[in-house]
Image: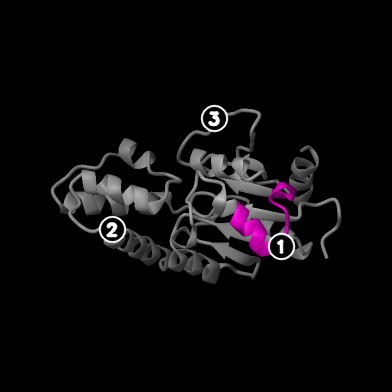
Amino acid sequence: MPAADVPAAVLWDLDGTLVDTEPHWMAAETDLVSGFGGTWTHEQALTLVGQDLGASARILQRHGVDLPADEIVDRLTSRVIDRLEHGVTWRPGALALLAELADADVPAALVTMSVRRMADAVVAAMPFPVFSVVVAGDEVLHPKPHPYPYLRAAELLGVAAGACVAIEDSPPGLTSAVAAGTAAVGVPNTVPLPSGEAWTIWPTLEGRHLDDLAALAAAR
């Protein structure tokens, strides 16, 4: 059992937080839009980081992708999973921190707006088991930035969301985590994260330990 002075659980975003998949998503979006004769810029791709895939699909439709939203999501996901099969790039410090959580028996959940098969592909690539709960984007009543995904993860773990720490890399994800009542930490990746009292910014997870997470939870 985890010690009383550590978080009840640590809730992790996937894309850009655990794995460096954002370049794969952007490349997939660009190829899809260009295949329908449109143009998709890097700046436009940045606006989709951390967003619900259904909402992203509707935006791509407005940029000329003449496909149903579900098919857009499926094509993008398949492209990213294909890239992961050639090797997973873990975000700096993420695996070391997860290993520390596993050694201390601190529960961990994966909370992602990617669909279940994408989340399962990443979990299967993990070098050790750690996630006892996965909340995927195609299984939630309300996507991020709504608090539901993080509330659902805490519910499935049997803990209070307010006793958890959430780790995110996007403004929609941080908004979701804060609204759920977690102690939220933002680790910037492809998009800048505004600083503020609602969450803590760590430039990287490298060198971060369970004690750091415990301090965040205790400071609430």
Region of the chain picked out in magenta, as a range: 151-164
Q: Nearer the viewer, residue 54 or 47?
A: 54
Q: Position of residue 31 (x, y in %)?
A: 24, 53
Residue to which mark 3 is pinned: 194
With respect to residue 191, does 115 lie above or below? below
Q: Nearer the viewer, mark 2 or mark 3?
A: 2
Q: Residue at x 79, y 37 (%)?
A: 219
Tell me the kind of residue under disc 2: Ile
Sequence order check, earlier mark of 2 and 3: 2
2 or 1: mark nearer the eye? 1
Q: Can I make out residue 87 in this image?
A: no
Q: Amino acid at mark 1?
A: Gly
Element at label 1: loop
Residue displayed at 23% across by 49% down: 61
Which one is nearer the viewer's eye here, 166 or 206? 166
The residue to which callout 2 is attached is: 72
Residue 162 covered by magenta stretch: yes
- Determine the residue positioned at 53% across, 34% down: 193
Reading the image, the residue beneath label 1 is 158
**Which SS class for mark 2?**
helix
Left or right of residue 33, residue 16 in this image: right
User: Does 44 sit left or right of 142 as displayed?
Assistant: left
Q: Earlier in the sequence, mark 2 or mark 1?
A: 2
* Magenta portion: prevailing SS class: helix
| Local crowd size for mark 1, using a 10 Å CA cut-off: few (<14), some (14–19), many (≥20) | few
Disc 3 crowd rating (10 Å Cα; few below 14, some 14-19, many 20+) is few
